[in-house]
Amino acid sequence: MFHVKHRVIIIGSGPAGYTAAIYLGRAGFNPLVITGALAPGGQLVNTTEVENFPGFPEGILGPELMDRMREQAERFGAEFLPADVESVEALPQHDGHPQYRLTTSDDETLETSAVIVATGSNVRKLGVPGEEELSGHGVSYCATCDGFFFKDKPIVVVGGGDSAFEEALFLTRFGSSVTLIHRRDSFRASQIMVERAKADPKLTLVTNTVVTAITSDEPSPTVADATSSVNSDAQSGKAPAIKTAGVSLNIGSGIGLTKPGTETADKPAIKLPGLGGNALGGGLLSGLSKQPQKHVTGVTLRNTVTGEESTLDCNAVFVAIGHTPATDFVADVVERDADGYITVKGGSTVTSAPGIFAAGDCVDRTYRQAISAAGMGCRAALDAQSYLE
Ligand SMILES: Cc1cc2nc3c(=O)[nH]c(=O)nc-3n(C[C@H](O)[C@H](O)[C@H](O)COP(=O)(O)OP(=O)(O)OC[C@H]3O[C@@H](n4cnc5c(N)ncnc54)[C@H](O)[C@@H]3O)c2cc1C
């Protein structure tokens, strides 16, 4: 049990939380980091190579990067508590300063003068067979992070909002083709994004369709177990071909016939189970995996209107169906936006509650990178420091 009163408590142990701890530790504040019960180290402990964090020209494994950050914070006197914070409550002011009481998942209560919330966000998952085990081996939730690994490979993006379109358009720089799969017949994304996507020769939009499984070159998950919450639709003209016995049909409003075998590398064939078809875009993943024997080879799809099942060859699946900021526990004390992101004043980390600061992916819906979270953690530490002094 911790009975020591820390003047500042950091909630969350991703790049934002650890960076704040390094700065506050060096400034002599002896911060307490409440790391989270299940995932100390944050989102990067779930990935393999991180190639875009400055200072590691050869790249570094995500878990190793987070271990190093923790060691650095520990070196300057940070303490760690492996628990979740379940609530933050404002107490009567002490010496004219607000005080806060934090209650953890172990029913521990901690009182403090300043809090840095750095609890990140959780990616929304498809929940389909193959997704978990292929995460980091072709399944990704971040195009900026992983697009580079799929040069000249067929890529699938799942989602229908602006983020999905942004990711899909970005990925056309790398992939031999990008197929965006969306469960409804219309997109939430802005019209301009949709128009841009339609004009891109590498990008195919597939509507009224859900991914029901992600397959690999290891024993494939069964479609019977599929519980996808995502669907897709097809646009006329640029739609991928469904292979049937003898002819290929284009999905979408203007159904057209193409001769079998005329699919191009940038428009791989969607194949109906059991009917064969050419498997385009095979080949090993170039970099995501330390275990190259296991990689994504395709997705199984179901049309939400007809119920028809098909498969699509690809080497990467980027899931872009949204993030959920981990901020519910703090909803009573700080203002959040409609999606649950904590709102801060201007370019600072100052929240609506005096003495509570917020940093990283629980605030930032735009950049969502380890380095931007770390930068914001630094700013939160400096904001907290000047508040406490
Ligand atoms: C698979 C994957 C790969 C990625 N690859 C890259 C990459 O290569 N390069 C890159 O720059 N970015 C990458 N990112 C993005 C990057 O990981 C995030 O932008 C970054 O981790 C955000 O840092 P953060 O500190 O804000 O939050 P997070 O890393 O999300 O950490 C939040 C922490 O808060 C804890 N927490 C949550 N709720 C509570 C609570 N109630 N009480 C206590 N603790 C709590 C969590 O357990 C976690 O430890 C990747 C993300 C994913 C998912």
Image (cartoon, grey):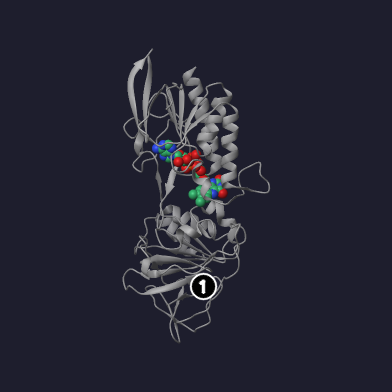
Residue 356: horizontal and vertical position, in percent? 41, 27
**259 left or right of 209?**
right
Q: Tell me the quarter of the image containing the N terminus.
A: top left
In the image as oriented, which residue stretches furthest toward the top? 95
Is the residue marked 1 within 8 Å of ligand 1, measured from its CB?
A: no
Quarter of the image for residue 374 reads top right
In the image as oriented, which residue stretches furthest toward the bottom? 246
Task: Indicate the amino acid at tag 1.
Answer: Pro
Who's the residue at 44% across and 67% down the image?
221
Who's the residue at 43% across and 26% down the image?
2
Residue 32: horizontal and vertical position, in percent? 48, 28
**231 left or right of 82?**
left
Question: Is residue 361 at least partly visible in the picture?
Answer: no
Who's the residue at 35% across and 17% down the image?
93
Quarter of the image for residue 100 reads top left
Residue 260: horizontal and vertical position, in percent? 50, 83
Residue 154: horizontal and vertical position, in percent? 54, 66
Q: Give SS at disc 1.
A: loop
Which residue position holds label 1? 268
